[in-house]
Structure formats: C-alpha cells, structure tokens
Image (cartoon, rainbow, N blue to C red):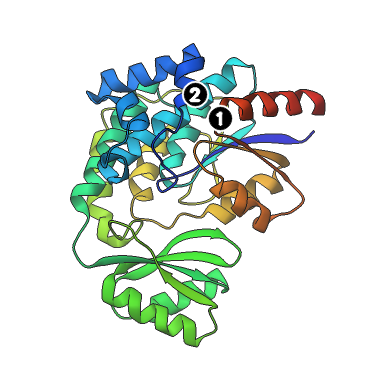
Amino acid sequence: MGKLAFVFPGQGAQYVGMGKEFYEQISVSRKVYTIASEVTGLNLPGLCFEKNEQIDITEYTQIAMLTTEAAILAALQEKGVKADVAAGLSLGEYGAILTAGAMSLEDVFRVVRQRGILMQEAVPTGGAMCAVLGMDGEKIAKICDETEGIVSVANYNCPGQIVITGEEGAVAVAAEKLKEAGARRCIPLNVSGPFHSAMLKEAGEKLGKVLEQVELRAFSTPYVTNVTAEYVTEPSEIKELLGRQVYSSVKWQQSVERMIADGVDTFIEIGPGRTLTGFLKKINKNVTGLHIEKVEDLDAVVKMLGEKQ
C-alpha cells in the first residue's frame, strides 16, 4: 500500500443530522462537540442535529462543518489510523491542520468561528459565483483576466469543473465569453457571496489578526495548502497562508495531483457528502477514494485498510 491521505470537504456539503451517529455512539466524537460548544458559546449538537435555518448561514455553517469533521477524525484516529499527509478544500483545510497537529482543537474552533463571522460580515452586495464546465482551467483564468472588473478563478476542483467568482456583472460577462470560447455550461451558484475573490481580501486580513493570537505547534504529518498546492511543513507558514486562503483560488485539483505524485494512492474523505471523492475520480482513476460520513463507513474503512496492509 502506498501513502494515505485524509481529505476534508468545505462549505456546501452540510445538512441537518450530519455527524449525529458519531455523537451518539462514540465518546471521543461526543467530546469534540462538547469542546466546540464550550469554546464558541454555541450549541453545536443543536446546530448540527436539530432542524434549523442557521446551518446554511456562513457564520454557522463553517463551525458546524468543521466540528463534524473533527468528530469523525477523532473516531478514526482512535482506531489507530494515521495519515501520511492531509488536505482540505477551503474550510476543510482546518481539518488538515488538525490532522497535522499544528493547532489545538480549541484554537481551531476559535479561528473557524471567527472565519465564519468575518466572511459573513464581509460579503459585499453584487457578488456572484459560477461553475464552468468543460473547459481547461488556464483558458478560464486567461478569460477572467481579460474581463473588466473583479472576476477570477475561485476553485480548480477537477478536470472540467472550475468555479469563477467576483463582481456579479463581471462574472456574468466572463461567463458569456467562456460559453463563446467553448465552455459546455456556465451555471450560476446559489451562494451568499463571492468567496475566494479579491472582494474578501479585507476578511482575510482580519482573519490574519485573529491568527496572530494562536499558538502553533511543531507537527509530524504534513499537509497541502489550497493557496500553493504545495506541502506545508513549517508552522511559521501557516498563519499567512490561512489569511490569504480566504481571497485566493483553491487549487484543489493541483493539491490532489501533488499528493499522488508523492506516492499517495488512497484518499479518505472525512465529513458530509462525497464531493471530494467525486472530484478524485475525475482527477485520477487509478487511486482509491474512501469516504467516512456514518459510523458504518468508519468500520468499513478501518476493515479495508487492515486488509490492505
């Protein structure tokens, strides 16, 4: 067996009831929800498990998603499963940081709570995002650069699926240009703001000030950052990268390709949904994508990994 990567999804995969089995059945996971509630002053079990409208509001979505991912991670680690490397898409990068051991659980929850608030507050009117299907990322980036106004690539998800972000008018113009240039489809996304665009630079800078108060730790498990799609091995790099991540492109495809080039052949997606597992199939069909969302998934993955060794 080659190397093993833990990967964590970002905002958008959340739903009411996510993680509930882990909370009810696994004590280390339940403790994660307790710590998150104590640190943030929010009722995380209520937010994640009981029907509510807050779960889809950025300010609350981010902490709810990350708490769920951290709870599942704790259960997996209790089984003795260790990653060789980790990565996460946007918000999910904080799951990778937990895997690396670069921050305490309490500090990660404090930072993510503030990240959600800052991004919610910073959402300007007139922002938009749009998924572009069936076109090369470099060509999309070039057309965005040539379009007047603020518009850029938000996410390099996988071959044939790129997301653009920025001012509503500029995104609309770029989408028309992209269709004329051969994009199969351009689909406006139902999001609350132009995430990962220059319009959120102020939020990223404010998050940098929050991160100044956080103590970083030496870590033995490296992770790959969205901003550069390269390994982070030094704690000193983390704060600046996390601030920039808010308004920079998410280089997810490049991050996965970087890990595969380094010998990763098995990826475990930890958290709600199968978004990253779907991207993985389009990035490279020759690697294994596993997924843990329910307790039965955890048992199946642990069994499968044991048989591989």
Q: Residue 181: give x, y in percent of width and height.
A: 51, 85
Amino acid type assigned to the residue bearing label 2 in the image? Glu
Q: Is residue 150 above or below residue 51?
A: below
SS of the residue at dot 1?
loop
Query: In the displayed structure, does residue 18 sit left or right of residue 300?
Result: left
Q: Along the horizontal axis of the image, is 214 left or right of 261?
A: left
Q: x%, y% of residue 147? A: 35, 80
For label 1, the residue is 294
> Real-space Cα distance between discs 1 and 2?
7 Å
Crowdedness of circle 2 by 10 Å Cα count: few (<14), some, many (20+)?
some
Judging depth in this view, the residue of 285 and 27 nearest the camera is 27
Kindly identify the residue that appears in the image at 34 percent across and 74 percent down. Answer: 171
Q: Residue at x 61, y 47 (%)?
A: 277
- Where 128 sits versus 274, above or below? below
Q: Which residue is mark 2?
A: 21
Q: Is residue 266 left or right of residue 276?
A: right
In the picture, residue 116 is in which quadrant? top left
What label sits on residue 167 in the rendered view?
Answer: none
